[in-house]
Every structure is written in structure tokens, then in C-alpha cells.
Amino acid sequence: MKKQLLSAILAVGCLASAGAAVNKLVVEPNAKGAPIPSTMYGLFFEDINYAADGGLYAEKIKNRSFDFPTPLQGWNAFGKVEVRNDGPFDKNPNYVRLSPAGHTDKWTGLDNEGFFGVSFEKDKDYNFSVWARVPDGGTSKVRVELEDPATMGEGQDKCSKEFEVKGSEWKQYKVTLKPSETVVKGKLRIFLCKPETTVDLEHVSLFPADTWKGRENGLRADLVQKLAALKPGVFRFPGGCIVEGTDMDTRYQWKNTVGPVENRPVNENRWHYTFRHRFFPDYFQSYGLGFYEYFLLSEDIGAEPLPILNVGLVCQFQNHDESAHAQLDELQPFIDDVLDLIEFANGPVDSKWGKLRAEMGHPEPFNLKYVGIGNEQWGPEYPARLEPFVKAVRAKYPDIKIVGSSGPDSEGEQFEFLWPEMKRIKADLVDEHFYRPESWFLAQGNRYDNYDRKGPKVFAGEYACHGKGKKYNHFNASLLEAAFMTGLERNADIVEMATYAPLFAHVEGWQWRPDMIWYDNLRSMPTASYYVQQLFSLNKGSQVVPLKMDGKPVAGNEGQNGLFASAVKEDPSGDLIIKVANTGDEAQELQIDFKGLKKNQNYSNVTMTTLHADNDAENTLDNQEIVKPKTQTFTDKDIKDMNVTLPAKTFAVYRFSK
């Protein structure tokens, strides 16, 4: 490399102290390594931390169908309001009847608190809808308003619309509201207009017009855009522990999440009571974000869908009695759910479930390739139940890859028991979970170097470094995730996919941390962990390239001067991509040599992207630039090697192109 380019690159970081050892990296760009699966880096979604209702799902009304266990939870009623249960939708039978208050100075109506407030922005359109009727026939008039509780009664310019409800048959009514101010913690208010006539209301809904791709029943655009920007290869949904449920009645059932949105039943969200320090008794699943929407989102962001279904076991942490679970002779309905889901995703439009998919707006198949059965189950009861699922899927859909589980731990008795069982059953992949401290991630860079290559592939389905302190994701934990991920990449022949978890958290509704993306009602924020995932995904490459450090294969452990590294080649561009994490407290000098390059095959450009911050640094909604990648590109006619100083606590991606 010419001196001018060398000087420019050295200027980016801090120079190592005089006499510091040089770490020599030898890369063989022309050597053939393992192909890197397209699913290598992806996303895991679970409705925790208000990730669905109040988050990704753009609905702003809480308990919109009055079917929470406490029917008016989330609502404030005034005047004469009655909850009735003989409504038009069998799975959501409740509705409210608004009747005259009985005095000319009294009003009848409701207001909704939303999810930590009903937020709305100035001059943007919001689509209000409701199913309504006049029970005795005739005509009634309803007014709907967006209110700012902080300024009510001060002559504010109300954002309101009135509409007429006609006849005794249930119909859907729609109006568009355009607020003249931005309010983060507003309310939606509904009045029965004077002169009053009794009216029934069901499924009260408010969406921003600006959802992702402008869809009705849509998703929050800024959050989906952040997912799309990761270019994920796989999208796992809907969890997580909510797949299991607290008991059989509250387990996640995908068939309840498809079809008309107004007839999808409310389900208990097990996370509303799990954490006493963050107890949310009004946290339920509306199922407005259901399996059809998950498949559609996967398609939108270019990720393979990976649904997880119940194996006949409910949460084993909470249910120690065998009678709480489905017995072996009771599994057929659960097996049918898996087979029917595959038909829903892939079946022809003249099949039962393929027809429903087409009626919902997607006649083309979703081309489902993977299905996970069971979440973090353990013990002999799990493989005993999983085996008949595997046989049934293999018999009807032999091309579908089946994901099993190694339990809730990254090592130990259950882990050691389940891996041989997954091999015996012939699962295609095994889902490993590890939420572990910084010391674990430092020691696990070579975790997959010696895995058996003849058994199932690995799905690192839930992982995150749990560093000490801080509310969001501090930088040092994210740096150690990057170090660990170099080991995933070097072992792409055994690791087929990996997904950080959890994905989303509302700053007022979080229950678990760290998380990849944080948000409030109007803003969203990528964390340092988000940027680590993005740097790997955008620089995934097509095949692994052999890489040695100081004459030895890179083992990716803390004994190599705190350095972790991987190298890949991208086709068809031919770019070489080297990732290096310096987890140490001192700068490290790197000498990168290219071995085996043919004449006139040298690189002429290098793009260097670095992620660096203080250990406890973290982004906030008010300051999202604290931890963010920085990129520089350098050009030279002939790059034969490279010498650079990598600062302490830095993750760097070097992309060489011709």
C-alpha cells in the first residue's frame, strides 16, 4: 500500500505506543470457504415491552373492542354507557351502548387513553373507524375528537368530526382527522351528539394514514424502516414465551390471528404480570398484528419467515404438573395447526387455508421454508412430543425445514440432553438461546469451532450481552456481541441463522432490557447493538475466507490480545470484507497481508467503517448520535497489504474492492 493511503488510514485512529506488538492477519481471498447462508443474520420478534400493540402495530386505541377482562379498561366513560355482549363478531362479542344522559347539560361518551397516550402530529391524517348501529333504527349522530388533556378548556382548536349512524344493522363508519398541533399524550374522545339518540359502538380504531406502505391495519412506518435497513435474512415470530402461554387457554394460537381484524379475539399477554418491577395489568394481545401481517412483513423486508408454534407444552417455568400440558394422545390438534399453517402460507387458493390467505389479499404463496416447533422447552417431555410433529411434517411437506430447541440455557444438563435428541429426531436446526454477561461473550468467540458438522445446523435464536448498568444498550456489551458474531461468521457451515433479542421496547412500557430498538409514541432510536447487527448484515458476504492471526487459525477467544476477527468474500463483486473487534483497553496494530493474489488482482479501494465509544456510552431518544458508525473510503492503485492501528474498544469493518 502506498504511503499516502497508509498515512490517511492511520490518521483515523490513534497510533499504538512505541514498540507495541504487531498483530499479523493473513487472508487468502482466493481460497474456497464455506458458503454463508442468506439467513445468517436476521430478526426475532416477540410481543414484549409493548412491541406489538403500542409499538410495531400502528393502532392507537387500547382495548378497541371492549373485550379485555375488564371491558372498559383503557376507557373513561361518562354519562350513560353500558357494555353489552351480543355483538356482531363472535370472537369479540362485547360492544358499548351510548344512551342519552337524561339531562340537557349532561353528555354521554368515552375517551381512550391509548398506549401511554394517544399521540398525533400536526397536519397529518389519522383514520378513525368504528362499527356502529342505531339499535331501534333511525339516525344518530356521533362526534369524535382528538384532545390534548393539558390544554382542554383553554379554547384550543379541537380536531373533531361528526358523522351520522343510520339504521339497525351493523356497519363500519370512517372519518379522517387532521390535528392542528402535535401531542404526545393525547386522548381520543367520542360524544353522543345532541339531540341524542342511542347508538351502539364496536371496534373503535385510530390509525395514522402514514403506515408502512400505506396499508390499512398497518404497521408503524419508522419502525419497519429500521428493520428494512438491516436487510435481514430471516424473521422469527411471534416469540418467545408467548408461544407457550401461561396455560393452554392463553397459548398463542395463530388461527385466531387471521381473517377479519374485527373478529380476532383478545388474548392474555404473559408479560403483563411476569415482572413485578414493571407490572402492566392492561397489556394484552389484540392480534391485530397476526400471522398474515407477519408473513407480509417478512416479504416486505426480504426475510425468510420463521413462525414458531406450540408443541403441546405450556410454559414449563410456570407449570410443573404434567397435567397442565397436552398429553401424547392429545397432540393431533397441535400437529394440525402446523400443517394448516404451512397450507396457509404455501397452499393453492383452492385449499381451505390458501383460500383464506387469498381472501386476505395475497393469492400468491409466501414460500415458507422453515417452521419452529416449541420454544424453550426441556426435559424428555419435549422430544417425546416433538417427534410426532416431525414425522407428520416430513410426510406431507418434506421440503420444510424444522427447527427444534436446546432449551433455555447455553450449556448445562438440559442443553447436553437435548442436542443428541434433536439429532436423533433429525431436526434440521437447533435453536440456542443465550442471554449472558460480558465475561461469557468474551469466552465464547470460538463456541462453534468444534461443533459436529454431521448433525443439525445451529440457529442462535435469542442472544444478547447483558452488561452491567444503563437503561438502554451500552457500547461495551454491543462490542462483545460483535466479537462473538465473528465466531458465528467463521462457522457459517454450521451456523445457519442468528437473531438478537428482544427487538423492540417502548421507553415507558419496557419490561426487559437490553433491546435493539427503543421508541416512544412518535420517535424511535437505534442502539449500538442495532448498528453491530447492521454492520454484519450489510457486510455478510457470500463465503467464508480463511484467516490466520500470527500464523494460527483465528480462534476468536480472549487470548489473542483481545482481538476477534472474521473474513468473507462477496460475490459477484469480488469484494473482500474483514471484520475485527478490539475488545481490549489498548490500541492494537494490525498488519493485513493478502495471500495467493494473482498478478493484477490487487485491490484498489478500501472502505473502513468503525464503531467506537466509551464503555458505558449509549444512545438516547434525545441524542441518537452518541454511538454511530463512521465510514471513510480510500483509493490507491495497488493495495497489496495494509497496516493500521485499531483503537481500543472498537469494532471495524474493512471492505476491499478492485
Image: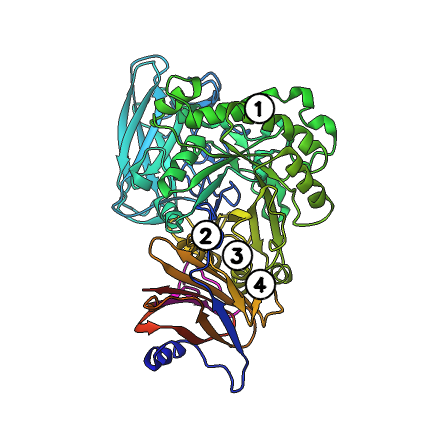
Viewed as shown, does residue 465 lie left or right of 175? right
Image location (x, y in percent) of residue 120: 33, 45
Residue neighbourhood size for the residue with mark 4, other residues' Cα within 10 Å, grouped as few (<14), some (14–19), many (≥20): many
Task: Return the residue nearer the eye: 293 or 391.
Answer: 391
Residue neighbourhood size for the residue with mark 2, other residues' Cα within 10 Å, grouped as few (<14), some (14–19), many (≥20): many
User: Element under label 3?
Assistant: helix
Are dots 4 and 3 in contact, CB under 8 Å? yes
Which residue bears the numbered disc 4?
556
Separation of residues labelled 1 and 2 (CA atoms): 38 Å
The amino acid type, in three-letter code, at marker 1 is: Ala
| Numbered circle sitting on residue 490 | 3
| Numbered circle sitting on residue 517 | 2
Separation of residues labelled 2 and 4 (CA atoms): 28 Å
User: Element under label 1?
Assistant: helix
- Disc 1 vs disc 3: which is toward the camera? 3
The amino acid type, in three-letter code, at marker 3 is: Arg
Name which of mark 1 and mark 2 comes first in the sequence. Answer: 1
Separation of residues labelled 3 and 2 (CA atoms): 27 Å
Magenta residue span: 606-630
On whether residue 621 falls in the magenta region, the answer is: yes
Separation of residues labelled 1 and 3 (CA atoms): 35 Å
Image location (x, y in percent) of residue 446: 60, 59
Q: Main secondary structure of the magenta part?
A: loop
Name which of mark 1 and mark 4 comes first in the sequence. Answer: 1
Name which of mark 1 and mark 3 comes first in the sequence. Answer: 1
